[in-house]
């Protein structure tokens, strides 16, 4: 132990003598390990990890093929993942292949606790939800099937563990107490287990309510008995003895029977629709061990790309530290030879070097582990759910990931700390004692290969970063079809404030009237489907005079709007006219469609004016709606995707929607009007909660959060890689130049000029940089093709980006070589020749 303690003290003294080397090595390891740990931790939780439930491998999610039932209300993912409640009930009660079948739907509810109103996320679940998943309560009890038998019969609620801690201060006494949900009393019966958020991966609902309480949770939108309204997800647990294929085979006869019942409710359907709806429709079982996750579809690609990039950074970090340690090993060759000449055992020297490497690895790994949770937390808030307090994933590190990355840092340091020992084992003692260094072709070749590799990886990372940065610029500059500047948006849901149905529509009009008189307000518009919010509301239609093709998708985006909505967003009308006050009446027919709708069905926007269509499928003579105008296309959900066929319908035509998103156009900076808006709404009704209150520019910025964080991280990783390559290049040139000191002195003594010496050193730089770029460029061109789906407005092999990166690498290489080259050019031949 005394020898080990002595080795530790000596190692610390050695590191203090070379602080620059120690700091660069430790920071390199810390950044590489920390970033790698953080990205993989998030990737593991969002994409790879199974749900924290009992036997998740037996969970499957239902989806179907064939025609939609009718109206689909989704919060993300494929429409074919959503089912009606009667269909869920048929599958739950009549199947023979599942041990349990649950249903779920994401909602927002207004909660009032101790006279403090709050808008929170919720989840409507079937009574067997927790039972099928095998989730245990932290306090009280969870739902049982008897809680979900009759509509409005059991107003009970379960709190999520995070919400319980955040709002109720982990008070066990809240179990049994009453809270108000949408102004209706609900009894808290329990708290869910810590670590469990939802069967929908990426969501973190604050409160759970039984499915049969839907009339109170989503007032004025029941649809529990409507077979033509698809809005919930179904997840089931397979019986132990059945495979997925066997379960599908056993379930599809039931599916055919239930669809036959639904088809009876669809009047005037065509033969092709009936064939697609019934005979060509099958129910499919998809692995649900990781839950249902619309979020996964949006972040899986970016996370995998970031994982690949950070993996390359970690590889560069290891190569860089290895190169630094080998350079340091060469400089210590004479020291080790002296110690051997004085009688030191070689095993003792190896022990000393291992201790030094272990210290570097431990410190670098510890710093990386310290950084990783901070990076993970930042990424979660930026990529997953900006602004929320209860995130669906944890920023704490998984022990497996932690152990692997920590071990990697230590292993690299230990492995390459042994390089001096290998040199001592094979060294020529006389030569080593005469010279300051021992020339070794093998170590030098390794360092050159290492630097060329780092340059090549830097090229790949820099090109990727350049493409992502250009993508972000293109997205920010994209034409949205509306003007986002000086536009404030917020959402209200009267149901959550206890408004009865008959007062909801009049309230929407009073809100508009109240907002219009605020100083600084130009106009006010409202819509049931907010822009840039990923909330689609689609319905199928029948267009009078249009010959529908077999298997043709006739779904359109159905958006209820106020009369001034298009004018407030400054969306121009291309043909016909905009909406007028006389259009916004109960049972009215006049609507406005967008350019995509008009071109799809009529060829030219001018041809659409005056034409008719009807809601629903199967009747080519319907004339329920009359097109009075065609508006220019505008982006609704995503900047990347083309506008979908959209109908703008005055909101008094149909009251089957829950909330309204308002847009306020101001004549001055939005910040100057925000307080006036809040005060006006407070005066109108203090119980109304203003949800998602922000400027439209902030809404768009949030929409671009994933693209922004990818560009920022890719740029950060690329700059880190460039720094590592510069350090590695400098180390190799400094080492090789020092070893060639006598050669350079001879050249100068024989008449060589300083410029020739500079050329000699810089030629090595050009050779290393050129070799790295030449080898990596074809690989870069190949790999950037995999980024195609993440890019916007730029080619994966964009020549401007590649040329700019090549120029930047050349500048960095010349800068790294400048100091060793100047030193070589200043060598005094008399000093260089006196080497013994």
Image (cartoon, rainbow, N blue to C red):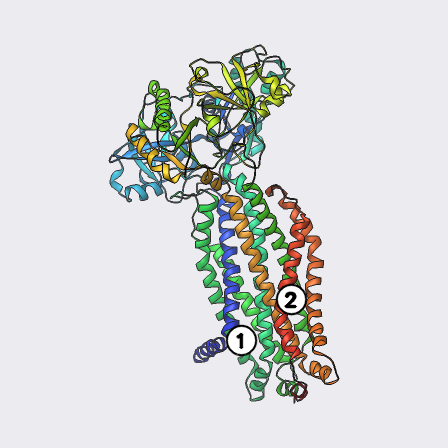
Residue 638: image x %, image y %?
53, 35
Q: Which residue is mark 1?
A: 353
Packing grade of label 2 (10 A; few <14, some 14-19, many >=20) is some
Q: Are marks 2 and 1 in contact (CB under 8 Å)?
A: no
Residue 774: image x %, image y %?
72, 58
Point 35% across, 20% down: residue: 506
Query: What is the quadrant of residue 263 in the picture?
Result: top right
Position of the N terminus by quadrant: bottom left
Side of 756 relative to 255 (left or right): right
Q: Would residue 393 be visible to someone looking at this image? A: yes
Query: What is the quadrant of residue 389 in the picture?
Result: top left
Q: For this rendering, which residue is in front, 721 or 285?
A: 721
Disc 1 element: helix
**Mark 2 or mark 1, which has the lower sequence index?**
1
Whether 113 is drawn above or below 224: the answer is below
Q: How many marks?
A: 2
């Amino acid at each position: 132990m005394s020898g080990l303690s002595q080795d530790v003290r000596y190692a610390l003294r050695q590191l203090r003598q070379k602080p620059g080397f120690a700091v660069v090595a430790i920071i390199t390891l810390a950044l590489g390990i920390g970033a790698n740990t953080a990205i993989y931790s998030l990737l593991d939780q969002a994409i790879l990890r199974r749900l924290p439930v009992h036997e998740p491998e037996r969970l499957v999610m239902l989806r179907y093929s064939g025609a939609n039932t009718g109206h689909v209300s989704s919060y993300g993912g494929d429409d074919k993942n959503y089912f009606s409640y009667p269909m869920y009930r048929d599958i739950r009660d009549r199947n023979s292949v599942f041990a349990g079948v649950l249903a779920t739907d994401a909602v927002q509810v207004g909660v009032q606790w101790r006279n403090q109103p709050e808008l929170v996320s919720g989840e409507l679940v079937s009574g067997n939800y927790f039972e099928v998943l095998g989730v245990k309560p932290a306090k009280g009890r969870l739902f049982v099937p008897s809680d979900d038998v009759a509509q409005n019969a059991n107003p009970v609620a379960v709190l999520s563990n995070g919400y319980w801690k955040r709002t109720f201060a982990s008070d066990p006494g809240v179990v049994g107490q009453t809270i108000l949900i949408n102004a209706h009393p609900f009894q808290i019966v329990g708290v869910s287990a810590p670590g469990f958020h939802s069967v929908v991966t990426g969501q973190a609902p604050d409160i759970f309510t039984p499915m049969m309480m839907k009339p109170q949770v989503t007032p004025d939108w029941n649809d529990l008995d409507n077979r033509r309204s698809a809005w919930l997800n179904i997840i089931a647990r397979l019986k132990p003895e059945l495979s997925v294929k066997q379960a599908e085979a056993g379930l599809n006869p039931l599916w055919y029977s239930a669809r036959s019942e639904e088809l009876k409710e669809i009047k005037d359907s065509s033969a092709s629709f009936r064939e697609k709806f019934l005979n060509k429709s099958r129910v499919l079982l998809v692995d649900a061990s990781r839950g249902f996750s619309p979020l996964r579809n949006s972040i899986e690609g970016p996370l995998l790309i970031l994982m690949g990039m950070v993996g390359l950074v970690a590889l560069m970090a290891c190569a860089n530290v290895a190169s630094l340690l080998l350079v340091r090993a060469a400089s210590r060759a004479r020291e080790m030879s002296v110690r051997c000449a004085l009688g030191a055992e070689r095993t003792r020297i190896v022990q000393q070097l291992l201790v030094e490497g272990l210290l570097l690895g431990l410190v670098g790994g510890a710093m990386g582990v310290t950084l990783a949770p901070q990076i993970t937390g930042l990424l979660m808030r930026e990529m997953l759910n900006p602004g929320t307090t209860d995130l669906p994933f944890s920023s704490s590190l998984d022990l497996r990931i932690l152990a692997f990355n920590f071990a990697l840092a230590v292993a690299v340091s230990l492995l390459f700390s042994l390089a001096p020992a290998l040199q001592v084992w094979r060294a020529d003692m006389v030569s080593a004692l005469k010279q300051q260094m021992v020339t070794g072709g093998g170590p030098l070749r390794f360092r050159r290969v290492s630097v060329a590799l780092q340059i090549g990886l830097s090229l790949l990372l820099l090109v990727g970063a350049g493409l992502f940065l250009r993508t972000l610029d293109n997205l920010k500059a994209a034409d949205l079809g509306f003007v986002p500047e000086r536009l404030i948006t917020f959402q209200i849901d009267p149901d959550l404030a206890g408004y009865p149905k008959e007062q909801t529509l009049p309230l929407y009009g009073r809100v508009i009237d109240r907002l219009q008189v605020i100083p600084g307000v130009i106009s006010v518009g409202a819509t049931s489907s907010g822009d840039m919010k990923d909330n689609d509301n689609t319905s199928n239609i029948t267009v009078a005079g249009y010959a529908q093709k077999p298997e043709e998708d006739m779904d359109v985006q159905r958006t209820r709007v106020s009369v001034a909505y298009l004018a407030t967003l400054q969306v121009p009308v291309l043909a016909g006219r905009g909406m007028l006050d006389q259009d916004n009446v109960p049972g009215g027919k006049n609507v406005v469609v967008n350019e995509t709708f008009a071109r799809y069905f009529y060829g030219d926007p001018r041809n659409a004016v005056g034409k008719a269509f009807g809601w629903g499928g199967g009747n080519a003579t319907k004339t329920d709606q009359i097109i009075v105008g065609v508006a220019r296309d505008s982006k609704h959900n995503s900047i990347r995707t083309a506008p979908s066929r959209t109908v703008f319908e005055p909101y008094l035509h149909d009251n089957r929607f829950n909330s309204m998103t308002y847009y306020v156009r101001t004549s001055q900076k939005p910040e100057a009007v925000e307080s006036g808006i809040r005060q006006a709404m407070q005066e109108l009704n203090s119980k109304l909660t203003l949800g998602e209150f922000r400027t439209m520019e902030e809404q768009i910025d949030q929409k671009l959060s994933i693209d922004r964080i990818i560009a920022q991280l890719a740029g950060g990783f690329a700059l880190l890689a460039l720094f590592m390559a510069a350090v590695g290049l400098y180390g190799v040139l400094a080492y090789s130049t020092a070893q060639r000191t006598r050669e350079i002195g001879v050249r100068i003594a024989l008449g060589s000029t300083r410029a020739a010496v500079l050329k000699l050193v810089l030629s090595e730089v050009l050779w290393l940089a050129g070799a790295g770029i030449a080898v990596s460029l074809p690989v870069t061109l190949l790999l950037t093709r995999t980024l195609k789906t993440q890019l916007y407005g730029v080619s994966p092999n964009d020549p401007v980006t590649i040329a700019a990166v090549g120029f930047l690498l050349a500048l960095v290489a010349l800068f790294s070589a400048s100091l060793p080259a100047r030193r070589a050019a200043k060598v005094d031949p008399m000093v260089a020749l006196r080497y013994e």
